[in-house]
Image (cartoon, coloured by chain):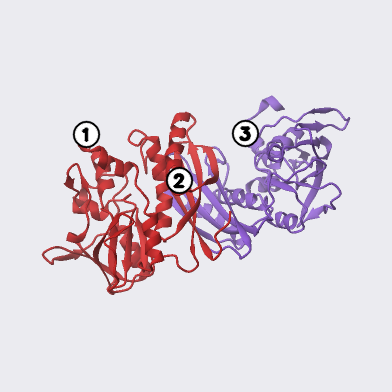
Chain colours: A purple, B red
Amino acid sequence: MRIPSGHEMLVTTDFSVEGVHFRREWHPAKSVGHRCLTRGLSDIAAMGGEPIAAFLSLAVPEDLSQRWIDEFLQGLLKLASEFNLPLAGGDTSESPGGVLADIVVVGSVPKGTAILRSGARPGDGIYVTGKLGGSAAVLDRLYSDARKSIKPSDWRGHLFPQPRIEVGKVLRDKSIATAMIDISDGLSTDLSHICEESSVGAEVSADAIPRASVAGRKVDLQIALHGGEAYELLFTAKGGTQVPARIAGAPITCIGEIVRRKNLVLVRADRARSKLRVHGWQHFQHSSADK
Amino acid sequence: MRIPSGHEMLVTTDFSVEGVHFRREWHPAKSVGHRCLTRGLSDIAAMGGEPIAAFLSLAVPEDLSQRWIDEFLQGLLKLASEFNLPLAGGDTSESPGGVLADIVVVGSVPKGTAILRSGARPGDGIYVTGKLGGSAAVLDRLYSDARKSIKPSDWRGHLFPQPRIEVGKVLRDKSIATAMIDISDGLSTDLSHICEESSVGAEVSADAIPRASVAGRKVDLQIALHGGEAYELLFTAKGGTQVPARIAGAPITCIGEIVRRKNLVLVRADRARSKLRVHGWQHFQHSSADK
């Protein structure tokens, strides 16, 4: 493999584990394959990179049907083809328990331009792409057996999330983002990663958070704050930067500001301030404590 | 990550799965970590490459002790340190069944010099490094409960195999090898890969195959021919090439010749010729059919 001259290399690796990241009874094989690659591509997007090649390691139980594997690969390869991404190798093995896929995506960025988690500074605005909480809300409904309340369009966003490669490239190319991460573990968790690595704090406006709608109503604030698997981008930009309202089709929303004091603060509409608790929405675990 | 200028990138990915590649009751955690990385490094060695960074994805059962994980990492990092190899990232997850590690090794070679499987030509000599069958023979004894017949020195070769990075570099640097592969699945299987990708056949001299000694006696020819996890290199070199008898401490043995006719032939001491059957030594499966 060759890296474009003047570029440096990005490597990401992400597990998709049955019972942790998906369930065979809920997720069609095509969705599992698609989401597996989305996990890797989303990490590349979050650095402003372009994907070059993917490598798949797949461990499957002895009794898994060939059809399931074929459909898994169809889902993965269809998404790969949208980015002209070759599946360049990998490994296969028997699994002692459940399907387990590890996706490696290799990408590149022009030298010195990768957007890191460590570049946020006090005064920077905090932005997100798209709407949050939709994927987690769908999972929630699956869990509570409220499957029928999920419209096909809501369901599709959960099953086939689109990695924000184009948005990431624009943010890097136009030097808009000072720090970036993808929202895979939930807004509060991923914002805390940026704050830790940048040695800063953040104030988030509760009202500003763009919430997805599922089954005809907006998801709860808590799901938008903590729900994972959104695969949206969370980035910061210097105060005064003209951040477009839409990039590559994705709405961009300012949700708060980076501050010097190393706390995460949630500001409500009535100006009430509270600590923004950091916790991911546990995969397949109903978190009643935070409702 | 940066690739040295004028180099191209190599990426390998290899699973190590409990019950398939190791057993917790037989293999100390340090050995599992060491062997996990050896699998990746051996693939880099087989292309004549130099390793740059490793990435580890590790899925473990909920009840696995922290001590096991610590020792696994110790074994892996000790081997990595021998090659100044940074563990640059990875992923972790809960596993629904057994320990599962996926190792990614990124390496590089000067552009256009990677040794491929497809370069063997009729008239080339066939060579192997080291001695074959030792690792498989140790497993065999474990299986048949003959653990006491294994000397610590034999056992060590199975638990802590050394990837042949230096040998691979010399073979590439001095343009000795025309094709190369590492013997992870067994000599017969890996030779068949070279022959298939080079569209050639091979004649192997049974007497020439360097057999390891375990418990004071040479392993059976069948184990040397088909036993896996040797992590030695199998390569071809043009007829007339002066191939050193030893490279970077490893003995080099000529075991046969590449031929035009696309068969694998085993030639015995009495000149009797038979078809060289291609099959790997199944991990943890006693193959009685071939004794």
Residue assigned mark 1 = B148
Q: Quadrant of residue B174?
A: bottom left
Sooner in the amino-acid sequence: mark 1 or mark 2: 2
- Residue B95 percent across, percent down from the top left: 49, 37
Residue assigned mark 2 = B80
Label 1 lies in what chain?
B
Residue count near mark 1 (Cα–Cα under 10 Å), binned few <14, some 14–19, many ≥20: few
Label 3 lies in what chain?
A
Q: Are marks 3 and 1 in contact (CB under 8 Å)?
A: no
> Residue lying furthest right in this view?
A270
Disc 3 versus disc 1: nearer the observer:
1
Q: Quadrant of residue A272?
A: top right
Q: Nearer the viewer, residue B4 or B99?
A: B4
- Residue B250 percent across, percent down from the top left: 30, 55
- Residue A289 percent across, percent down from the top left: 68, 25
User: Is B283 located above or below residue B267 in the figure?
Assistant: above
